[in-house]
Every structure is written in C-alpha cells, then in structure tokens.
Image (cartoon, helix red, strand yellow):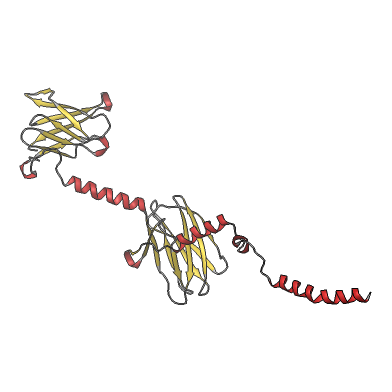
Amino acid sequence: MIIATRNVGAILPVAATIVAALCAAPTFVPKAHAEGMSANEQKGTGISGQWRGKKGLVTKGADGKVIFLYGEIQPSVVCSPLQVCDIELQAGEAVRDVLVGDTVRWKVEPATSGAIGGQAIHLIVKPSEPDLVTSMVVTTSRRTYHIQLKSHQNQYMARVGFEYPEDVSAKLADMNARLEASIVPGAGVPAEQLNFGYSVSGNARWRPTRVYSDGTKTYIQFPRSISGQDAPVLFVVSGGENRVVNYRMKGDMMVVDYHVERAVLVSGVGWKQEKITIRRGG
C-alpha cells in the first residue's frame, strides 16, 4: 500500500503536466470551418466583393447629375441626414419593388417627372444619421438595380442617374447612320458631279429618301427597312408610255442603268397599291 501511494504521487504531477499541455496545444480546424464558410462560399463572397469594390466609370451629367454606367459596378450612392438623394431611373421604366437592407434608418420614397407615357421614376433616399451602410435592390419592368447606400455627415450626391449600354449602342448606330447619310453611295464619282435635282411625290411606306444621277445611271435610295423585302417595280416614262429598263437592288439602293427623266415606282395591286412618281428638275 505504501508503494502504491508513492507511485500515484509520482504520476499525478506528470499527468497534470500532460493535461495542461493538451489544453494549451491548438486544435487544428480547417480554415473554412474556422470562418464558418465553405470554400465555395468564400469564393462566392470574394467574387461579389470584387464587383462591389470595383472602380467603375463615373461621369457628370446635366444639372450636376452623377452618372453610373448600368451593370458595370455596384453604384455607391452617398447621402446625408437632412438632405435627399434623387436616384433617377430610365424614362418609361416601371418600378416593381424596392428592397432596402436597413428599413429603420433609411427611407426611400417614389416620385415622378416628365409627361405621361414617358415619365421617369425617381427614388428619393434619406438616411436618419451618418456613418450608415446598407444595400438596396430595385426591380423594374426592364432590369434590376443593385445599389449600395452610404450616409455621410455633410457630403451627399444630390442627383444620380444611369447610362445604359443599349442607349450607347443606339447612339453609336445613329451616329454611323448620319455619317453614312452624308456620303453619297453607289455612284463612284465626287458628289459635286452628281445631279440631285429630282422631286419625289406620292405616299408609300418605302418612299425614296434620295434620288440622284451621275449622267449615265440613276440611283434611288430607299429607307433601310426595305432591305430584305420586295422592292417596288420601276417603270420609266418615255413618250407617254411606261417602259421597263434594267435596274438592280443593292441593299436599300436601286441602281437604274438609265438617265431617268421621269419614272414611276409601283408596289401592290388594287386598293392596296402604292405609287411614287419621280421627276427630274422638280
């Protein structure tokens, strides 16, 4: 019994040291579990964080409006207590829902501007205090906006709007159309050598936009919408009679192998028939 007691007394300090060492040793836990997220969750929040923190193009619009390019970044709109931020959406765009992360300290009220049929929706944003950060999602009849809202003691964006990629593309197409319209196609000679002295009379959905001649051929230009559709039939008036001459379509251009003095374009039959008369010299 005495020996047993001595052995226990010798073991106890050693056991205590081992227990203390085990308690002090760090337990290995995978990083994802330590942070409470899986690898995919970490990747997803990383992607979202990069998008939210991305530096996008911010430009100045009319009346000091701050313009964001829609879809490029998450816009960060800075507001201030006792002031209002006016976020203007695209004209004709109908708002479905407005969802704000902090509905207690942020107020969002709708307003409208413009004539009926082309009205624009405005979201009037007001924070109750500075140093707040939340997010807002706005769903509309055309798109979904993801916006970050921040409040500052005295700095704010009074007016905020958006530039839309499709509008930019439409403006570019319009510029190209204007540029092409200033260039005389088809003739292959300087514009000053062409005769534009033609008059066009009559009504038709395909009514020519321009007629000119280089002295040998006559060029009849139609609206772009005629491309891919059946072109009207051309009759050249000569000696009081309609006669057919050689012509061909190149896109929206009718090239006539004849110096036309007077001609008639006809499409359809009966009461649906459309007719345009072309005369040289008005």
Is 83 in front, or is 145?
A: 145
Relative to 163, is 24 on the left or the right? Answer: right
| Residue 142 screen position, x and y as percent | 44, 50
Q: Is residue 179 above or below residue 61?
A: above
Question: Where the C terminus falls, by quadrant?
Answer: top left
| Residue 3 screen position, x and y as percent | 90, 75
| Residue 62 screen position, x and y as percent | 32, 64
Relative to 226, is 185 on the left or the right? Answer: left
Task: Work out which residue is located at the far front of the displayed protein and give it.
Answer: 3
Question: Where the N terminus falls, by quadrant?
Answer: bottom right
Relative to 65, is 8 on the left or the right? Answer: right
Residue 84 showing in the rendered view: no
Task: Work out which residue is located at the far right of the displayed protein and give it.
Answer: 1
| Residue 275 screen position, x and y as percent | 20, 30
Q: Is residue 241 above or below residue 189?
A: above
Q: Quadrant of residue 91?
A: bottom left
Question: What residue lies at 25% left-to-right and 39% top-to-bottom?
Answer: 224
Question: What residue lies at 25% left-to-right and 35% top-to-bottom?
Answer: 226
Is 7 in front, or is 176?
A: 7
Is 95 in front, or is 43?
A: 43
Q: How many marks?
A: 0
Residue 121 showing in the rendered view: yes
Question: What residue lies at 52% left-to-right and 74% top-to-bottom?
Answer: 129
Question: What residue lies at 10% left-to-right and 26% top-to-bottom?
Answer: 237
Is 222 in front, or is 216?
A: 216
